[in-house]
Amino acid sequence: QVQLVESGGGLVQAGDSLRLSCAVSGLTSSSYTMGWFRQAPGKEREFVAAISWSGGPTFYADSVKGRFTISRDNAKNTLFLQMNSLKPEDTAVYYCAAKFGGTGKYYYWGQGTQVTVSS
């Protein structure tokens, strides 16, 4: 059973940086795609970034491109999201997610971590 546990959220000011972590367990192979999503109050959940657990290219939403960086440490079974130059509109609950392969819907989800950016 794949389990994902996020941490690292908090309250920061605009322009600050924050790094989210996602502890990953239960992966049966390296053929998983890992992603970060977020959901702001009153809005639908949206894609933020993705990376293959085995490495390779990364993908970002236009709204975070150049500010956020997704990475993973396979030895520590951890997925990261480095967030720089944070804006108030980045305020949301951030979720770690996983799916087997590169297509289809994300099947496994963490419980989320709150990120609040004050102006």
Image: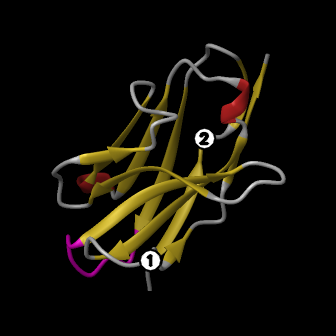
Residue at image coords 50%, 22%: 84
Mark with earlier residue (2, 1): 2
On screen, residue 19 versus residue 13, left or right, reads left
Q: Overall secondary structure of the magenta stretch? A: loop
Q: Residue 94 in the image: state x and y as whole percent.
A: 62, 50
Q: How is the image coloured?
A: secondary structure
Residue at image coords 20%, 70%: 30
Local SS, label 1: loop
The residue segment tinted magenta is 25-31
Query: Where, quadrant-wise, is the C terminus in this rendering?
Result: top right
Locate residue 75: give its quadrant: bottom left
Q: Nearer the viewer, mark 2 or mark 1?
A: 1
The answer to whether residue 28 is magenta is: yes
The answer to whether the residues at label 2 and label 1 have Cβ atoms under 8 Å apart is no
Locate residue 117: give its quadrant: top right
Nearest the camera: 108 or 21?
A: 108
Amino acid at circle 1:
Lys
Q: Residue 67 in the image: state x and y as whole percent.
A: 45, 25
Q: Which mark is residue 105?
A: 1
Query: Where, quadrant-wise, is the N terminus in this rendering?
Result: bottom left
Disc 1 crowd rating (10 Å Cα; few below 14, some 14-19, many 20+) is few
Local SS, label 2: loop
Q: Which residue is mark 2?
A: 8
